[in-house]
Image (cartoon, grey):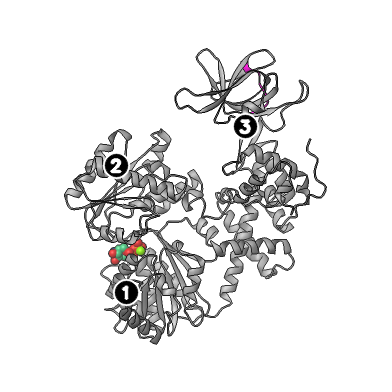
Amino acid sequence: MVVLNPRLALDSPVAELPKVKPLDKQRLAALGIRTVRDLLLHMPFGWEEFGDPKPVSELMDGTLATVVGTILRIAPGITRLKRLKLTKATLADQADDELTLVWFNQPWVAKQLHKGDRVAVAGTVKAGRYREFEMRNPHHERLDGGSSNAPKYIGGLMPKYHVVKGLTSKKLAGWVDAALPLAPKLEDELPEDVRARHHLLPLAEAVRLGHKPDTQSEWSEARRRMGFAELFELQAAFALMRASIAAEPAAPIPYRQDVIDSFKAGLGFELTRAQKRSMWEAFQDMAKPTPMNRLLNGDVGSGKTAVAAACAAMAHAAGLQSVVMAPTELLARQHLHKFRGYLEESFPGLTVELLVSSQSTAERRRVLAAAASGHCALVVGTHSLIEENVQFADLGLAIVDEQHRFGTNQRELLRAKGSGRPHFLAMTATPIPRTLALARFGEMSVSIIDELPIGRTPVATEVVPPGERDRAHELVRNQVRQGRQAFVICPLIEESEKVVARSATAEFERLGKDVFPDLKLDLMHGRLKEKEEVMKRFVAGETQVLVATAVVEVGVDIPNATVMMIEGADRFGLAQLHQFRGRVGRGAAESHCLLLADDPSAASLERLKLVETISDGFRLAREDMERRGIGELMGSKQHGMSDAAMDALRKPLLLDEVRDEAQALLLSDPRLEAHPLLRDAVEARLEKISIS
Ligand code: ADP
Ligand code: MG
């Protein structure tokens, strides 16, 4: 029995809990757990149901089970094939039926358990041909009391915690156990009436049931409460951000029909309904004396640039300048070209200039002067735009393309180029369902372009069975022979960028040697310094096949690329596969997307088949949300929400309710003076958002 240190408090460092070693402290810190409070708020993300202890005679192959018995034999050993260290033991239950236990790579188990020990084990049962049973890497617990004592930590419902290397869910559960007596001291940040309206558990109760539920439904209730509270804090934080932005003045840009008429007349096409709607939403925002803060979300090729250009034209008509920032020079140059095409002829006097780091000093000086004098209406560029010496005479509109590629800080620096606060338009080609956009980017209003211009040929998409990889390579070769280019995307490996880079390099070398020795290949990954040069060579057609990791540029137009071959496609989210696919099919020729799966199971293939049949990125994103959770959409690290919050989001309309609640509360108490706990929580969220 652990005796609780009487001085232990919620704010005590975790190291004051029993059995937290210095290394554990570091590992816990990596999970964001520094205090006892942090530990209590770190809830399990799932459970394993091992059930109550069972006699060996009642075990069933493939099921989870708990067995209590006595160790008959235990010895360390080595596996025959791979020479791995293992520990092998035999356990006998009350009826003397035997169960074999094997632990791989856990040599310490042989030191922890001894012949004659009474132990409980919990794991997956494997049955041999003669109903001899085995458990591999089971959880174990030594039982020290008499025959009646039941396992305390294992069996039943066992929590699954997010951990890092060196920690296990069982270790975490032990520490949580020691900390739980402090749970009643946790104060609730959620206002009482909000909790009552949504039937949410008090925090202390949710934490207790979250870690130690008797049933799955108790855990679900606890999790629902935690997820709600997190979304509530986030939405309150966003509401505060919106209020602070709205308190700043901006130069209104009045709507002018004649401007939009000239703009349309100069386009070689009809705007889609979604483009018109998005423009209209932006025009309404810009006409106000407070800054627009809008996210324009539309699939690759949906025509976001035209919407942005119309906004810049409107700003110009109001006597204000605009700026467009893109993440790479290549993209900035393509934008320059497009914006000039959309604007310069229709609006005499509207000049568009480029600012990137590779320019000559003279050229740069000329552009800087044009921006500072107000002579130039629109400057397109890269990070160079946020350097100190860049000044505008009167900046009214700031536009950021692929906004997720920039930090909040960089976006702020761009906005700071105005004399007041310019209107702000962020663009992203990652289709994000509306709910998720509001949950994650709730400080912005969202416009969605959910239709593509008519007349596009969809990319022919095919799931290629593992046995037919040669056929996929043949298709690549055929297209290259016709003068086209191809991408080969390497599988996503969970671990570090370093590992990914290494495996991409290996694939690049293998393809170059064994598969396409006659073709011109190039390699692209995140750790490469000369990413832009590689991309430039590909755009220029000097490379025929680009072997790349997931970093390969979004947004760059390469009309001559007609094949996108994706290895390990089952490891990517559907929306992400759709993103890759969007990198081909930009030209007139028919394009192909080939999906190869590492895991040829029916479920995995069925999921991939969706990409074959669905061409709408938003629909695929919603499928991802339903199937694999939102983390898959945003990259699990970046979304900044816990899985409890993401789970809560699956309930339709919940987010709208949370937003309304947060908005209402702030209306009655704009500084959260009556809710100091919530204020602290919201401030912590604001800080987190602003460094993301
Ligand atoms: P994205 O949303 O990916 O930035 P772009 O703005 O680059 O898309 O547009 C992709 C291509 O489609 C461009 O060549 C553009 O001129 C063209 N385009 C945009 N809107 C339309 C439309 N309504 N009808 C036909 N073509 C369009
Ligand atoms: Mg674009």
Q: Residues within 10 Å of mark 3 (few under 14, many from 20)?
A: some
Of badges 2 and 3, the one in the foreground is 2
Which amino acid type is shown beneath numbered disc 2?
Answer: Arg
- At x 44%, y 24%, the residue is 81
Mark count: 3
* Vertical placement of residue 347 versus 163, above or below: below
Percent x, y of residue 125:
56, 23
The answer to whether residue 115 is above or below residue 242 is: above
| Disc 1: which residue | 359
Lateral position of residue 655 relative to residue 93, left or right: left
The answer to whether the residue labelled 2 contacts the one labelled 1, judged by CB atoms less than 8 Å apart, is: no
Point out the image quarter for the N terminus: top right
Residue at 60 percent across and 64 percent down: it is 687
Bounds of the magenta span? 48-56
Q: Report the Cα–Cα distance between label 2 and label 3.
A: 44 Å
Dot 1, how many residues are within 10 Å of its Cα: few (below 14), some (14-19), or many (20+)? few
State whether label 2 is within 8 Å of ligand 1.
Answer: no
The outermost residue toward the right is: 6
Label annotation for residue 510: 2
**Side of 13 relative to 387 (left or right):** right
Q: In terms of image quadrants, where is residue 47? A: top right
